[in-house]
Image (tube, rainbow, N blue to C red):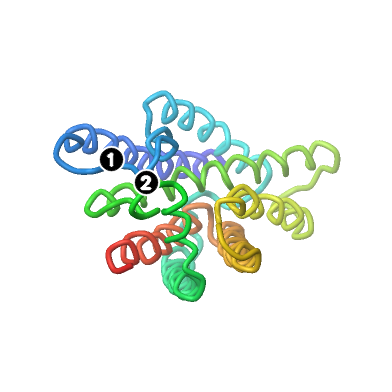
Amino acid sequence: MEASVGRSYRAGLVLFGYLVFVKVLLLVASAASPGFRSPTQAGVFAWWFLGALLLAGAAAIWLNHWVGLLPLWASTVPLRDRLGWPILLGLVLGAISIGIDVATGWTKLSAAKMGIPSIHIPWPNSLLIYPGGAIIVDVLYYLIPIPLLLGGLKLFRWWSGAPPAAAFWAVGAIAAAIEPVTQMSSVPGHPLARWVEFGQDYLLNLVQVWSYRRAGWVSAVVLRVAFYLVWHVLWGLLG
């Protein structure tokens, strides 16, 4: 277990190092280019928040191993499962999101409601910020709540090895609902558009939870990065 935990911490440090890199680069470039669209977006890259995320993430990594989940970067899992499938699924889900936006126009309505030109962070900062955002939200939506809830279940019903599928999916279904539930109210227009966007968002999160269980947490991050590159970066440029 010690070797796999160490591998997970090294993977976590690489991703956290990217967050620090983005933060420093944005500080240097902030005077020359537009940055975030809202104070909330900027807040998750504040130094105090990154420090809190590092501590919470470190505890969650240990808990991830204690409950019996795969290491964050599982060397025993083929690369096609850690990288190939997550990238492909992220690209497909990103294309679906673009299709929904074309059909409903909800992002333009949302931007107009907030008084900003677009919900997407402008280029070229988008190319740096969104992969960092994928890391942050995947810590908050998956790496912390899933092992934490599974740890609570394990205290009452001990198991050895990987947690039972029923226990994982009961917890995973809850974790997958965090993002769509909290963002549903931000989708303006017809109520049907809200439910369509909710369904798409929940599907994205469920697929990430599936990838987390199948290939380790980093695979879920890779999936969201691929999704953001299509949905926020590419569509931000074209839409």
- The mark found on residue 70 in the picture is none
Q: Quadrant of the N terminus?
A: top right
Classify mark 2: helix, strand or loop: helix
Closer to the camera in the image, 95 or 169: 95
Q: How many numbered discs, if any? A: 2
Q: Residue at x 39, y 47 (%)?
A: 115
CB atoms of marks 1 and 2 within 8 Å: yes
Residue 4's place in the image compared with 100, above or below, is: above
Residue 73's place in the image compared with 18, above or below, is: below
Q: Which residue is mark 2?
A: 132
* Image position, residue 61 (x, y; %): 55, 39
Work out how far the residue at label 1 is from the one at label 2, CA to CA, in angstroms.
Answer: 7 Å
Observer able to see residue 80: no
Classify mark 1: helix, strand or loop: helix
* Image position, residue 4 (x, y; %): 51, 45
| Residue closest to the far right | 156
Residue 134's place in the image compared with 17, above or below, is: below
Residue 203: name its quadrant.
bottom right
Q: Residue at x 47, y 66 (%)?
A: 86
Mark 1, other Cα within 10 Å: few <14 / some 14–19 / many ≥20: some
* Image position, residue 183 (x, y; %): 58, 51
Mark 2, other Cα within 10 Å: few <14 / some 14–19 / many ≥20: many
Q: Residue at x 31, y 66 (%)?
A: 234
Q: Amino acid at mark 2?
A: Gly
Q: Amino acid at mark 1?
A: Val
Q: Which residue is mark 1?
A: 22
Sequence-wise, the earlier of marks 1 and 2 is 1
Closer to the camera in the image, 209 or 216: 209
